[in-house]
Image (cartoon, rainbow, N blue to C red):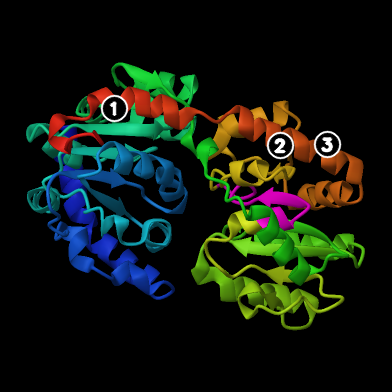
Amino acid sequence: MARLAYRALLWLALPVLLARLAWRARRQRGYLSHLGERFGVAPAPPAPVIWVHAVSVGETRAAAPLVEWLRRERPRATILLTHTTPTGRATGRELFGDAVLQAWLPWDHGFAVRRFLDRVRPACGLVLETEIWPTLLRECARRAVPVFLVNARLSARSAAGYARVPSLAREALRDLAGIAAQTPADAARLGALGACAVEVTGNVKFDLAVPEDIDSRGRALRTLLGTGRRVWLVASTREGEEAPLVRALEAAAPPPEVLVLFVPRHPQRFNEVAALLAGAAGSPVWRRSGGQPVPPGARYALGDTMGEMLAYCAAADVVLVGGSLGRYGGQNLIEPCAVGRPVIFGPHTFNFESAAEAALAEGAGIRVRDAGEAVRAALALLADEPRRARMGGDAARFAQANRGALARLAAWLSPRLPASCGPGPG
């Protein structure tokens, strides 16, 4: 009955999904590109095909070391990388170029899923983090296509949502061929919903590849920002987070040597945030895409480029991790830690809860309650160089100590990849 109700709700929701797609496309045209793929009209790649699903930017970046391992482990296989958002798709293109094929994941209607599987004919599927689609997993199980949920995480909030439809969640989880979870807490929540034999392999986001030239890239960006200034990076902000921070900053009146660099999470919001900052400053705001130095005396700057987050972090003195002041669950705090920068984050970190708690325990981070407290914490850190250096060192050691999840995931996954995925490198 739960599955029938789910299918009925999907059909009822279809006009809403289309309207929402059109609405989002007003700000980000990519939502309407390749529209047929949303209904399963995917590319028909040469076999064997390993299908990897990474919903958006964070999952796509997390998938990068896994995709590179798959290319080495199964060099004759075609990698199909699916996404849900245009920013995720753009990130995949930036990371892999033509080395992988890309498509939208179809909506979870039976006809779309069957068309997708008929065209792609995957030998296996790897789904990152928390993407559990009952129709897709059932159709894969019927076709004996093993699908693995990898780097899996399940917050208490998400677990409570799935628990409202226990039979549907249990069936979907048992249609998976295996689950590799980030933490024991994730494994326990998945097990409570009915998942079997969940392995804990860690969070592959700790295994991000830090480019060898990141220090020089950070110094080059810092030259534009001002070498005589102290820089607070407000990274990956979401809607509704910037305005309270700006109000708190205006009330706090930071010293003139402090520059606050905002980098919104989504590119369609660059102009909106630029207007907010310009209104507070009383003059046009500096934008990274212009390539010019920040004018003397500027209080705010805008990072409006994609693919430079590590460089932004390396150029900053202190980093606030966005998505955590609003109820978004937080964005990736591992990137600033990896380049040795102290992190500040708000109360909402359920997407990175274990990493946030570990960063606090290791002295790498500070949790704040709201925008006003975030501003006070950042200004205090910017004024205290010894503390910044100590926290930065703790952050780098924290990031380094948690590496190794990819090796554990690879060791777990390698014997489970079916022979139809193609021969190994030998």
The label shown at residue 414 is 1
User: Which segment is the magenta one?
Assistant: 312-327
Where is residue 70 drawn, in percent x and y? 31, 40
**Kind of residue indicated by mark 3:** Arg
Q: Earlier in the sequence, mark 3 or mark 1?
A: 3
**Kind of residue indicated by mark 1:** Ser
Residue indicated by mark 3: 390
Residue indicated by mark 2: 395
For residue 425, what is the image quadrant?
A: top left
Spatial CA span between label 1 and label 2: 32 Å
* Disc 2, SS: helix
Q: Mark 3 Cα within 10 Å, few/some/many (few <14, many 20+)?
A: some
**In-image side of 229 versus 310 (left or right):** right
For residue 174, what is the image quadrant?
A: top left
Tell me if I can see residue 250 in this picture. Answer: yes
For residue 14, what is the image quadrant?
A: bottom left
Spatial CA span between label 3 and label 2: 9 Å
* Disc 3, SS: helix
Q: Residue at x 71, y 36 (%)?
A: 395
Where is residue 362 drawn, in percent x and y? 72, 27
Spatial CA span between label 3 and label 1: 40 Å
Q: Earlier in the sequence, mark 1 or mark 2?
A: 2
* Disc 1, SS: helix
**In-image side of 182 versus 124 (left or right):** right
Q: Residue at x 62, y 52 (%)?
A: 322
Where is residue 348 drawn, in percent x and y? 60, 41
Mark 3 and mark 1 residues within 8 Å of each other at the beta carbon: no
Give the position of the C terminus as an image quadrant.
top left
